[in-house]
Image (cartoon, helix red, strand yellow):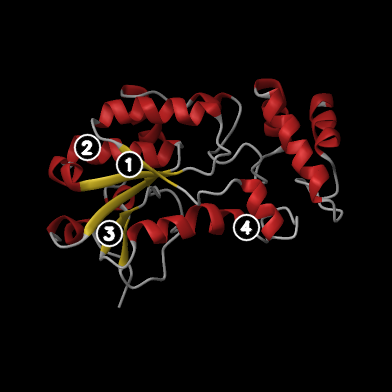
Amino acid sequence: MSNHFTLKQALADTESRHVLGLSGGKDSAALAIHIKDNYPTLHEKIEYFFSDTGAELPEVYDFLQILESYLGKEITRIGSDRPFEHWLKVKNNYLPSVQRRWCTVSMKLEPFERYVGTNPVISYIGIRADEHRDGYVSSKKNIKAVFPFKEDDLVREDIYQMLRDTVGVPKYYEWRSRSGCYFCFFQRQDEWLGLKRNHHELFEKAKGIERVSGNGYTWVQGRTLDEVVAHAEKK
């Protein structure tokens, strides 16, 4: 049995829980807005939630408050109830990386699957029509994924326009290209520099985690954060 649903199937389903996970980023926020403005009946029954790692940028929390006000509904906060430092010790001080994304599993995916439990669930995912990926789709049989942007043929510029017309674009996009923890290993060199300039205290915390980790691992393979930002500043 497929773990994908069409939007038509989802709208007709009155037995399942309907959930939409907000990352603090542009696409999931725009999807919540799209549903509120175009599918009001679905909006009434959908559960909006945010997986809080405790390592989010301050701008994310500010944006969630604005979004919550626009939606007129509470955004439920879920999480692992343990800080990143706990999970780092559990993982023998090995930093997460593109190859070993244990932080996503322990701090976002597992809390989500506990949140929905064994109930039949329809999860709405903000993958756009111009993206060739599905994102996270649970292998659990009780969770079905729906991709409204793909079905409604909405692309990147549509998402930005939707945000500009309503709640605005999250402030961190002024210096960062994606949502995620302040120490996210997907950051480019200039984004690490942006973290240092915009949130120096968080940059120093990321450096501290790097030092504690040891094992020869750094957030950016082969270079310390000080070396990364020094190189970025020379550009």
Q: Residue at x 23, y 30 (%)?
A: 72
Asked whether the viewer can see residue 96, the reply is: no
- Report the amino acid beneath label 3: Ile
Q: Residues within 10 Å of mark 4 (few under 14, many from 20)?
A: few
Q: Which residue is mark 4?
A: 101
Residue 3 % position (x, y): 33, 69
Residue at horizontal 85%, vertical 49%? 222
Secondary element at tag 3 = strand
Q: Tell us which disc is closer to us: 4 or 1.
A: 4
Tell me: residue 218, above or below residue 198: below
Q: Nearer the viewer, residue 223 or 44?
A: 44
Are the residues flagged by discs 2 and 4 in contact, CB closer than 8 Å? no
Q: Which circle marks residue 31 in the picture?
A: 1
- Give the CA separation, mark 4 to mark 1: 25 Å
Could you say where residue 118 lies in the image, as x and y percent from the top left? Answer: 31, 68
* Residue at image mark 2: 36
Residue depicted at 55% across the width and 41% down the height: 180
